[in-house]
Image (cartoon, rainbow, N blue to C red):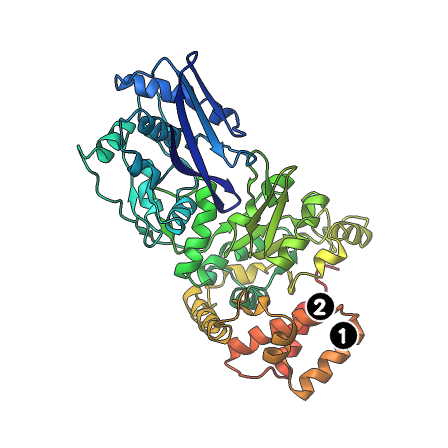
Amino acid sequence: MVTRAYTVAFEGIEARLVEVQCAVSPGLPAFSIVGLPDKAVSEARDRIRAALGSMAIALPSKRITVNLAPADLPKEGSHFDLPIAMALLAELDIVPREAVETTLALGELALDGTLMPIIGALPAAMTAVEEDRLLLCPQPCGAEAAWVDAATVIAPRSLAAAIQHFTGQAPLDPSEAGEVLDPPAGRDLSEVKGQERAKRALEIAAAGRHHLLMVGTPGSGKSMLAQRLPGILPPLTAAEALETSMIHSLAGLLDEGGISRARPFQEPHHTASMAAIVGGGKGAKPGQISLAHNGVLFMDEFPEFARPVLETLRQPIETGDVVIARANAHVRYPCRFLLIAAANPCRCGYMTDPARACARVPVCGEEYMNRISGPLLDRFDLRVDVPPVAFADLDAPATGETSAIVAARVAEARKVQARRFDGVEGVRVNADAGGALLDDIAGPDPEGRAFLARAADRFGLTARGYHRILRVARTIADLDGSDTVRLPHIAEAVAFRLPAGR
């Protein structure tokens, strides 16, 4: 007779249902696992044997065969230990078959039977709800999985506790969702002295999720500005928090089941590999652009990143997701992020300072900025020069607006966009709008349209650049509280579109 248990295999943020079939039959004693398992899954038989031995449960001197169906789906990870053990225990009539067959289980076994934490409990709970099954997972993962509404999560500390629960000896209470973590105290925008134009660009970027390129000499405040962006962004909505947490769950970044409403802020080093940025490696893990989903990706020293790494950003910026191609599968991760890039104007960094510039000015600046290809540069909605701050301004007291004041304006603009795009699939902010929708919401008045036509002719704007100006102008109008896009909004959007650092 064959006993069935259920678990999941991860493909991106999708958790695909896997049926664990266990059969104990006469023959030479053996314990085999088939169904395209990787090394960690194949080693489960030794962990299971030791865990059962620690509870004085001996395996029969028969042939034990475990099949993981569908057999052509790669099975990776140690979370297959628990479902295989539960299927075997049901086949040996130690736990009820009906209880095991209506449960979705995942967890890693220690040699003493303790259940070790695993990644992916949150997307697994989503699948459990879709399949109308109870979720069985390790105790450290219970608070994370319980965030899914309608999910019943049982989280024992050990395999022995799981057996006692299913046999009715010591039933466990369902797990409760973890705490909503308070966002960390951010740095305040008022600490940045001067740089009013850059602050305005940062506000527009936050309000409409527009990509921003800052170019300036070393020490002019580019990184300082970027690090204060989280303080003016609105918190994640409940749906965004769950969506973002599913990616962080697969990366093992959720802290004790807590979900944060703070938007992610990822800042990879310029030596990061392509797999680190876009995802990949063993198991096709999410990269920095996916970990920044619904948040900010800050890339300092932008031209210093490897050219192939930069070019891979072009498609995710447009589509909002990334596909990692493998020989036998394609893994898709969402990655709607706000890209903030910072760059020096040249290799030495002082091209605009006659007293400190090198002898190769302006050729060095052209060569350095040409590391950013035209198609990638065209995807930046806002470009701003960040000049050095005078020492007199540094000694003066801070007089700029606080992050709270700017955040209030950004939040109000986001509310306007939420109402505008309510019910429109795939569109949350102005940066997502396109086609007829963009024409409908961002069509400028006659003066603005004439000005934009002259600017397009004067600066040789591409069709992408033209539409991005309309999106930025719509955001500026939202910040201004205007229902229509007028000439001043178009003019400011065009001004931010002009090349920076070139």
The image position of residue 273, as x and y in percent, is 63, 39
Viewer-proximal residue, 33 or 442? 33
Q: Tell me the SS state at disc 1.
A: helix
Sequence order check, earlier mark of 2 and 1: 1
Q: Residues within 10 Å of mark 1 (few under 14, many from 20)?
A: some
**Direction from residue 439 to residue 36 in the image, left or right:** left
> Please, which residue is most extreme toward the left here?
169
**Direction from residue 356 to residue 25 in the image, left or right:** left
Q: Is residue 243 visible?
A: yes
Residue drawn where x is 71% and y is 68% of the image: 465
Residue topped by disc 1: 456
Verify CB contact (< 8 Å) between mark 2 and mark 1.
yes
Q: Is residue 352 visible?
A: no
**Direction from residue 367 to residue 249 in the image, left or right:** left
Residue drawn where x is 37% and y is 42% of the image: 255
The image position of residue 245, as x and y in percent, is 43, 49
Question: Quarter of the image holding residue 106?
Answer: top left
Q: Tell me the SS state at disc 2.
A: helix
Residue topped by disc 2: 465
Exactly how many numbered labels are in the figure?
2
Mark 2–mark 1 Cα distance, whole angstroms, equals 9 Å
